[in-house]
Amino acid sequence: MKVNTVFLVICFCLSVVCLNAQIQPVGIEKKFEKYISKSPGFTKVVADQPVLVRFNHVLNASEIRLLNPKKRLSGDYFIVQKSALSNLSNSIVNQEQANGLWKVSDRLMNVLNKTGKKRDPLVVRLVFKNIAEQPGLIKGLPVKSIDRVNNIYTVAVLPDDLIALLEHEDILYADVVPVAKEELVINGLDLSLNQISNAHTLFPGIDGTGINLSFKEKIYDQNDLDLLGKTIPGAVVGGTATSHATTMGTLALGSGNSFIRGLGAAPKAKLAYSDFDNLMPDLASDLGRLQIRIQNHSYGTSIDNDYGIEAAAYDKQIFESDTIIHVFSAGNIGTSTPSVGLYQGITARANLTGNFKQAKNLLVIGGINRENISENLSSKGPAYDGRVKPELVALGEDGTSGSAAITSGSIALLEQFYLQKYKKSPSAALIRAALINSADDLGTPQVDFVYGYGRLNVTQALKTLDENRVSVYRVAKNQDLIVPLTIPANVAGVKLTITWNDPPAAVNAAQSLVNGLDLSLENPSGNLTLPWVLSSYPNLDSLSKPAVRKVDQINTVQQVTLDNPAAGIYNVHIKGNRISQGSDQAFALAYHYTLKNTFSFISPDQNGYFFANEDNYIRWENTYPATNGNLSVSYNDGATWEAISQNVDLAKGFYRWSGPDRFSKAMIKMEVAGNTILSQSFVISSPRTVKVGYVCNDGVVLNWNPQPGAKDYTVYNIVNNVLAPVLTLTDTITKIDIGKIASKYFAVAANGTGFTGLKSYTIDYTQQGVACYVRSLFASLADDDKIRVDLSIGSTLDLKNIIWEKQTGVNTFSVLQQTKPVTNQLDYFIFDDKPKEGIQFYRVTFETANGQVHSDLVSVVFLKGDQFSVYPNPVSDYLTVLSGSFEDYSLSIFNILGQKVFEEKATSSNKFALNALSTGVYIGVIVKNGQQLKKFKLIKKKL
């Protein structure tokens, strides 16, 4: 029995050994063999040549930093300088001498794999170590362009020649030129979601004045009502405007001329555009010439998961300038699966659209709907090396383009505030720190790869600046910098964020972080709290795990939170032990307290608007421990209240309310934990609909639907690019002297006692399809061989009589009937009881207080099924034949000798070209279904 047991144990151990032998990785996988050098006799440029290495596990951030690889191909495959292998020699499974293909971007690799004709040149961007002088390596190659700022030559090169070029040490990276495409836009705008409306109320002078933004895409419509006068003097103009660019500009800085939803985040800011045909950063000098420090990028390319040319270039510009802020949309392919990079094959992760979005010093913005849910198509992180992307989310229900534009406009508000307060431009790191630290946490607690650090909160970001809760510091290499922080009593939570403009990493770097900092918070007892860090392991379950507190070795943003901290003096530690470039590193630190037992309304804001008969969002911030509250509304300054909803879920932070059909001021009340909180006074109304009554020489008549309860109405006209009040009246119709108006754009709002309702949509009176009284006039065939003439007019103002007329000769008309207009009746019709065969012409003459006005002519053909009418006769070139039916027919023409000189079947135009006929008299014959139906004399005259 003992022998059998021993035998079983031995067999089990052998099985385990065999199993381990089976699962140990052996050799280089086939998909990575293309990186192995096939030319052992090739003379290498340097002795310490890169090698392709396979490790026995997925390397973590510390191991990657120790290894300092040239490129990461997957979690366990790297291109490494041979001299660095000793650092992880015990983990190596296999190594092979590498060729130069590892320098190729994933995009270019796809092109090389698909290139069937090796003799067709490719247009490739080559990054050099230095291009102070033209590299001899590319001598003889056609040079398309040179970027000396980023050491890039764009050349045309054959695939085989490119592979040989990549063996040289001087070439760092090769890529094709990507093409940008616009991403989707949002349909509606709700500035309360990101607390922009609230910011406008609390900081009334902060509206973007003095701030210039650039939008990198196509040109916007400079004549759009919300962008009038927005273009920065001296900026490039021209080209074909796109609706996407116009919408993006409106979201960021629209003036609200068109409608309330055309009001942007920074309505007094100015705008310029830069064509995204060039995806590299614009020259800092060009941006500086126009005093631009904020640039929006609402576009993408394809999924590009490496630290490529664009990512390095944008990091370089932000690091060197310190004050330029770039904002990118995350992308609209959030359900896609990346096919390249560390996270290839993982569904709905790591699908940011464009290499530039892999940069660490800029902001990438995801999209959420009005109920704080991430849109499925909003692209998600992580970045190629596991960093947090997107950093923030903002409203973007149909795409992240709008999310980025709203954020760019919001940053303009912060820029203006900082400039006014400190008389200098803020560091991009300071703005990022203020925005990220003030964001409202959504999704998985603290941080995740869907919502980033949370929802943009402009009001809290401005308060961070206003209350001096963000500053820039410098930490020396190996220094432990301590910043004291006093936490008062009654604090529910504290949040701290640091971020910094990091030097650009080498293009193709496995990790982008160059100067690593370490944040921690020490309490009065000496205990440390570390920042929140997400798992970057390439597995969907790992990427979905909640963040844990640990040292962050890959991000340039670090955040610490602490719930219910005891009052006292804390120490914020920022260590510079991992600074590898330079003697120190600047960083921005922001902090925020949340007090216990507070409640405040975000929306409605003071004197803001809710739409009657539409869904509106009541929003709040709450730190009471209670989970439910009661909502009610008052329409009489709090004298009486009507319930909206009981047991409202306070954790949601909003309640969707269908506004009643009212025209009134109102207040909202929340009852929570025995406390009553009132909102600011706001207005419930619906916009009026403005119509044009007529456009005559003596004036324009406007009218609109009445608003029950209104005491009067205000008419607005765009004056000096701004919608301004020009007239107040009690009637719902007005006649305006064309010679006394500043523009052709009008809107109307109803006024109540002590408040003004929503303005109507602004209309262009010349584009409403209304002439002098006439909205439409048309004639049509009726039963019983009659013709019906219908008239629709825009107004009966000053109209005394309507005269219906029929043309009976050249400039000759006979009266068919006269109609006395009925006040406010706009539609009329008559019948012509005796139409003649052929085409009929009609018009209407209006007798007004100022004389007569004639309409244009309208026509109709009156023919029975087998009847035809021809004109002109005499004819010089084309003869038109009108038929009473849609059946096919043919036209034959005979000369006076009876010879057929022309025959042709009818076409859809019913026109026959008779240019070739000589002058004279002819006989025309029309035949249908073999039967002659019309015979007529035709006179051909000279052309």
Image (spheres, grey):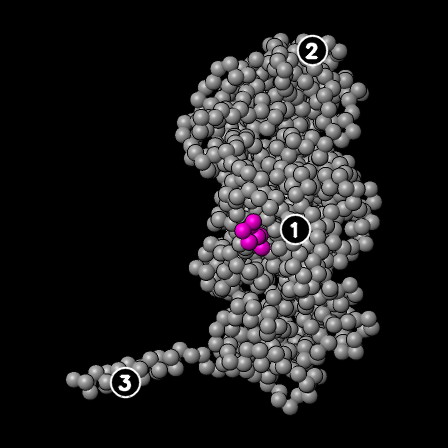
Above or below residue 72? Residue 281 is above
Which numbered disc flags the more N-terminal residue, 2 or 3? 3
**Residue 300: % across, % down:** 62, 55
Look at the image and tell me in which quarter the C terminus lies.
Answer: top right
The amino acid sitting under disc 1 is Val
Callout 1 touching callout 2 (CB < 8 Å): no
Q: Which is in the foreground here, disc 1 or disc 2?
A: 1
Mark 3, Cα crowd under 10 Å, few <14 / some 14-19 / many 20+, is few
Which quadrant holds residue 903?
top right
Of residues 888 and 21, the one nearer the viewer is 21
Q: Which structural element holds mark 3?
A: helix
Is residue 424 something one can see in this rendering? yes
Q: What residue type is labelled 3?
A: Ile
Residue 805 position, x and y percent, is 66, 17
Residue, disc 2: 798
Residue at which label 3 appears: 10
- Residue at 61 percent of width and 21 percent of height: 757
Find out whether the residues at labels 2 and 3 contact each other: C-beta distance under 8 Å. no
Residue 392 x/y as whole percent: 58, 48
Q: Give the range drawn in magenta.
A: 520-526
Does 190 appear in magenta?
A: no
Q: Residue 483 carries which label?
A: 1
Query: Looking at the picture, which amino acid does disc 2 mark?
Result: Asp
- What residue is shown at x 49% (from left), y 24% (from top)? 676
